[in-house]
Image (cartoon, rainbow, N blue to C red):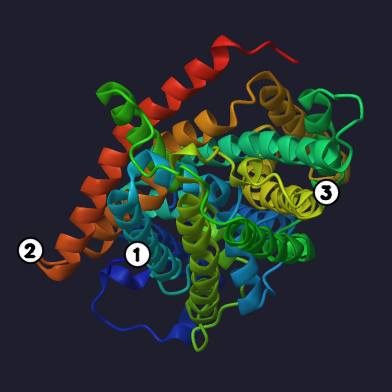
Amino acid sequence: MAGICYISLPLSLPFASTKKTPLGLLSNEAFLFIRLSFSRSVQMGSEGAGLSRYPQGGKMDLEKVNDDKELDKWLPITANQNGKWWYSTFHNVTAMVGAGVLSLPYAMAQLGWGPGVVVLVLSWIITLYTLWQMVEMHEMVPGKRFNRYHELGQYAFGEKLGLYIVVPQQLVVEVGVNIVYMVTGGKSLKKFHDTVCPNCKDIRLTYFIFIFASCHFVLSQLPNFNSISGVSLAAAVMSLSYSTIAWGASVQKGKQANVEYGLKASTASGTIFNVLNALGDVAFAYAGHNVVLEIQATIPSTPEKPSKKPMWKGVIFAYIVVAVCYFPVALIGYWAFGNGVADNILISLEKPRWLIAMANMFVFIHVVGSYQIYAMPVFDMIETVLVKKLHFRPSFVLRLVSRSIYVAFTCFVAITFPFFGGLLGFFGGFAFAPTTYFLPCIMWLAIYKPRRFSLSWFTNWICIVLGVLLMVLSPIGGLREIIISAKNYKFYS
């Protein structure tokens, strides 16, 4: 029996006998033993049915189970599981469409027409495929939901190895995105101010980043994913709005005089570095997988109506919105400005002034929502460690202090290193490529073990190879861009 573990308990269990025992004759302790053993086997799969997760002894086990359930009701990821399928749509749009879309024309300028279009389309297809894998694996084990990315990693690679593989990468992604969005929010607000009031006294970027951070000292106190659904909806609408403004204003502006479509760099080494940085920009633009399991955790699930159906429906609508946002901005922006386009398309679009000001305000509102989407899993990790490992009591004060410290940390890093273009390339390649492009494929191969040389086997290995190349190469270009920007940068200017 796969779900049975033989341990010493103060009761007599007739498992060794071939004689069948009616269930009605089993004691409560026997039922507890069976339940815990089966639960462990479901959670750990082929790793065995040990009871190491809980202390031995019936009463203590029940208390531990009850404590875990109570903690799940408090933690932000599992506190509310009444989400609708359209929550999945705008949460995924908010997570994916963000600062990255504004850099796509710049990425096209570094890649050129042919390679640029191929990279955009391939990324859209590959990331949709790996997102489908994540949705399918959320409930692959009957009666068990992998509500967090690292829980799926632990099932695929083992309790400890899964944590070591997934958690560092997920934290780099989510904390990195929050830092980049701090910079993006501050720059967009500064651009709005300078556009609306060109004759006003110049204000440091640092102060605008502080203003952006101040919003999150308040919003970060919203307890869980579903409580930020209104913020996420507004952010999703804003992303569609400023993307439309970006490509619409580019059409209105038309093809610029003396526009050039050759590669941006004049030297071979410069071209290589630019291509690598562009790959990081594209990887950043298509990243949303780091929060997909956490988003699916908010949707109710039963054996008859598993959460993957409404989740996948929401994902399809989200990816349609992604395509509507990304492809027109990238292609039309590059068509209008060629390789002279700025790393943020809104900088190249100077007129009409009121429209550019509106677009920058839309960007500001959107990244407010995006920051919260990526911060929520981090809050979940922090609060889990504080309660389970450091034995703090779950409370409003604990949440207020821990989340405020995190917001202050991301604000400090953002005002210290606000290199927008380079940050996109560096974090896009170093962090997003593994968790978005190939880690889901590795988990799929480890868990489902498709037949060698089958279509599934080939597809996953192609994604893995492309993802690893992206992870290794693209941070080089981003790091170079950061170094170039840092030469003339004065801290806290």
- Residue 476 screen position, x and y as percent: 36, 26
In the rendered view, would you say 178 is above or below 273? Answer: below
Type of amino acid under label 2: Phe
Residue at the image point whose x is 57% and y is 35% from the top:
176
Name the element at disc 3.
Answer: helix
Front label number (2 vs 1): 1
Q: Amino acid at mark 3?
A: Leu
Tag shown at residue 341: none
Please give the name of the residue rendered at 33% of the width and 52% of the height, measured from the top-left corner: 113
Do the CB atoms of the residues marked 2 and 1 lie less than 8 Å apart?
Answer: no
Quarter placement of the N terminus? bottom left
Q: Residues within 10 Å of mark 2 (few under 14, many from 20)?
A: few
Amino acid type, residue under disc 1 in the picture: Ile
Mark 3 residue crowding within 10 angstroms, few (<14) / some (14–19) / many (20+): some
**Which tag is nearer the camera, tag 3 or tag 1?**
1
The first of marks 3 and 1 along the sequence is 1
Q: Who's the residue at 42% across and 60% down the image?
A: 43
Q: Position of residue 377 (x, y in %)?
A: 62, 48
Can residue 240 be seen in the rendering of this structure?
A: yes
Marks 2 and 3: in contact by CB < 8 Å?
A: no
Q: Is residue 455 above or below residue 215?
A: below
Q: Which residue is identified by label 3?
A: 219
Which residue position is annotated with label 1?
A: 125
Q: Quadrant of residue 406?
A: top right
Question: Which numbered marker is on residue 453?
Answer: 2
> Which residue: 81% across, 22% down?
204
Locate residue 55 relative to residue 182 in the image: left or right. Answer: left
